[in-house]
Amino acid sequence: MTESVAASRNITLRCPLCLTLNRLDLAAAGRPVCGKCERPILVDRPIRVEGEDLDRVVADAEVPVLVDFYADWCGPCKMMAPVLDEIARERAGEIIVAKLDTDRSPDVARRFEIQGVPTLIVFREGQPVARQTGALARPAIEAMLES
């Protein structure tokens, strides 16, 4: 395996502006841009995913993906948002933090058996490896990412 392949950290994400799916290498220098509209894709903050994209994002990711299953009306979800923002910013390029609104994607919430929000699930190589329901402090979230 060549060093460039070993160092790649690929992920597929939808451009929030033009909605084009992009295959990005998080290890590449500079900020990733959309292949179609050439606007930056901001991976240093939580990325909103819709139901139809979640499977693709977690399956293609060569980095851990932390998915926050949340709802806009949820108080504990709002309390956790700044912590997830910090983690996304500080670990940009190492992990992806994604957010999925369970009210807008109820089929996905049922498929992942989301019984309450917030629910955090960490995916590695397309498979869930850690899961927790309820508001968590940052050390607990970091421990999930290391599991």
Image (spheres, helix red, strand yellow):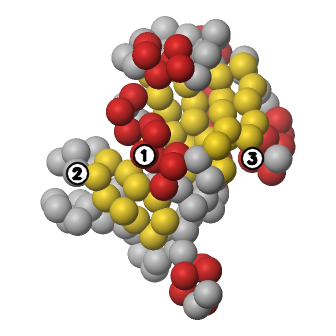
> Which mark is nearer the camera, 1 or 3?
1
The disc at residue 56 is 1
Residue 89 in sight from this viewpoint:
no
- Quarter residue 92 falls in: bottom right
Under tag 2, what secondary structure?
loop
Name the residue type under label 2.
Thr
Under tag 3, what secondary structure?
helix
Which residue occupies the foreground of this view, 123 or 48? 123
Does residue 127 appear to the left or right of 44 in the view shown? right
| Residue position for label 2 | 20
* Residue, far bottom: 2
Identified at 28% across, 44% down, the residue is 16
Residue 53 position in % (x across, y down): 38, 39
Q: Earlier in the sequence, mark 2 or mark 1?
A: 2
Residue 67 position in % (x across, y down): 57, 36
| Residue position for label 3 | 145
Identified at 64% across, 9% down, the residue is 115
Name the residue type under label 3.
Leu
Under tag 1, what secondary structure?
helix
Circles 1, 3 touching at the beta carbon (< 8 Å):
no
Q: Earlier in the sequence, mark 1 or mark 3?
A: 1
Q: Earlier in the sequence, mark 2 or mark 3?
A: 2
